[in-house]
Image (spheres, rainbow, N blue to C red):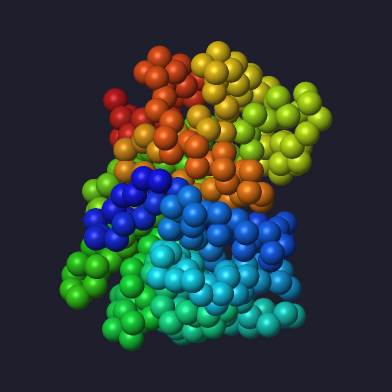
């Protein structure tokens, strides 16, 4: 496994991030623990989750599964960089109560305490804001984070799904306040088929020293051999959700077919190529992989050692051209 610094910090993380969104809803606790053990054995030390994972009446379930795994001991907690998120509503079932979601100082404090309890740990290495909160000023957010850092409950703060201007705003206000490091990472939707992050999000992250953590690196399975699996009658992710909806677009379907043909010609696997492409992109710390099985994890780990030939990279840019950085992407 390769390691890199998380943004401008001294923290070393694996080039693959183990995503856990499937733990609970699709993968039971025993299999989830087996996947985390296998990831650790492979050198993956970066585990990402969120307080809302488990969803609906089971929200928080994923953190609990991770917490039970950490409680098994064997230096599991000391070996991993643990990241979770706050924003989604974690209030009791029934009519929504105020102050159980978003990024008020009250909800950040409440969210941290609840996550620590479910995760069975005394600190969160990377605490991420799952979405922007237009109603809470960053002065309040950073005040809450500063207290948590002083208490030793949070080490670093990161963002997720932030536009470039919010990354800049957050870190400029952090710099003016002093005493806080500001955002150190941004978790965004980024893959071969969805490259809009290249316009402003990734340049902003690079300018402010944030590590970029792409989510959905296979675009919901679209880049994992979706058409091949469709022909073979397999791959549930290829026949539902974002992947299936995307394939209804004839132009995108043609792009995906060209992609799979190019990958086949190179003698490679589509999912491996999609991950390897991201690993070679400027500013990317590591993509989030969300395996539901041990086999899917093994496939993702292979991609770390894959170096794509220049001719294939050029062909991928022709098939999935990015928008280019702004303002050139939309101005002269």
On the image, which quarter does residue 259 sit in?
Answer: top right
Say if 51 sits above or below 258 in the image.
Answer: below
Residue 48 drawn at (x, y percent): 50, 60
Query: How many numbered discs, if any?
Result: 0
15 horizontally vs 118: left or right: left
Say if 95 sits above or below 192 in the image.
Answer: below
Residue 3 drawn at (x, y percent): 34, 49
The answer to which of 95 and 315 lies nearer the viewer is 315
- In this view, the residue farthest toward the right is 233
208 horizontally vs 246: left or right: left
Residue 309 drawn at (x, y percent): 40, 20
Using the rendered image of the protein, determine whether residue 219 is visible from the camera's viewpoint: yes
- Image point 37% across, 18% down: which residue? 310
- In this view, the residue farthest toward the front is 74
Residue 24 drawn at (x, y percent): 69, 64
Using the rendered image of the protein, determine whether residue 111 is visible from the camera's viewpoint: no
On the image, which quarter does residue 219 sit in?
Answer: top right
- Image point 24% across, 60% down: which residue? 10
- Image point 57% across, 43% down: which residue? 298
- Image point 78% across, 34% down: which residue? 234
The answer to which of 131 and 304 lies nearer the viewer is 304
Say if 284 sits above or below 65 in the image.
Answer: above
The answer to which of 17 and 258 lies nearer the viewer is 17
């Amino acid at each position: 496994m390769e390691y890199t610094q998380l943004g401008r910090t001294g923290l070393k993380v694996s080039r693959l991030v183990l995503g856990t969104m499937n733990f609970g809803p699709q993968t039971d606790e025993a299999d989830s623990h087996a996947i985390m053990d296998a990831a650790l054995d492979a050198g993956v030390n970066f585990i990402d989750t969120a307080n809302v994972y488990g969803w609906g009446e089971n929200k928080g379930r994923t953190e609990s599964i991770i917490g039970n795994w950490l409680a098994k001991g064997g230096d599991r907690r000391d070996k991993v960089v643990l990241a979770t998120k706050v924003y989604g509503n974690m209030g009791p079932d029934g009519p929504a109560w105020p102050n159980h979601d978003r990024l008020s100082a009250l909800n950040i404090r409440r969210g941290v305490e609840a996550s620590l309890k479910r995760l069975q740990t005394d600190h969160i290495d990377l605490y991420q804001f799952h979405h922007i909160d237009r109603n809470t000023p960053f002065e309040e957010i950073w005040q809450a984070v500063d207290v948590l850092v002083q208490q030793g409950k949070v080490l670093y703060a990161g963002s997720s799904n932030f536009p470039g201007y919010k990354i800049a705003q957050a870190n400029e206000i952090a710099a003016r306040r002093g005493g806080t490091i500001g955002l150190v990472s941004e978790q965004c939707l980024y893959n071969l088929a969805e490259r809009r992050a290249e316009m402003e999000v990734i340049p902003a992250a690079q300018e402010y020293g944030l590590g970029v953590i792409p989510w959905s690196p296979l675009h919901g399975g679209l880049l994992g051999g979706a058409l091949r699996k469709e022909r073979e009658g397999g791959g549930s992710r290829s026949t539902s959700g974002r992947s299936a909806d995307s394939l209804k677009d004839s132009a995108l379907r043609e792009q995906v077919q060209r992609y799979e043909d190019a990958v086949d010609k190179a003698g490679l696997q589509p999912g491996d190529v999609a991950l390897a492409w991201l690993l070679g992109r400027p500013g990317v710390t590591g993509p989030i992989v969300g395996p539901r099985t041990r086999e899917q994890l093994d496939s993702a780990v292979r991609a770390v050692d894959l170096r794509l030939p220049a001719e294939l990279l050029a062909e991928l840019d022709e098939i999935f051209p990015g928008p280019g950085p702004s303002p050139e992407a939309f101005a002269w």
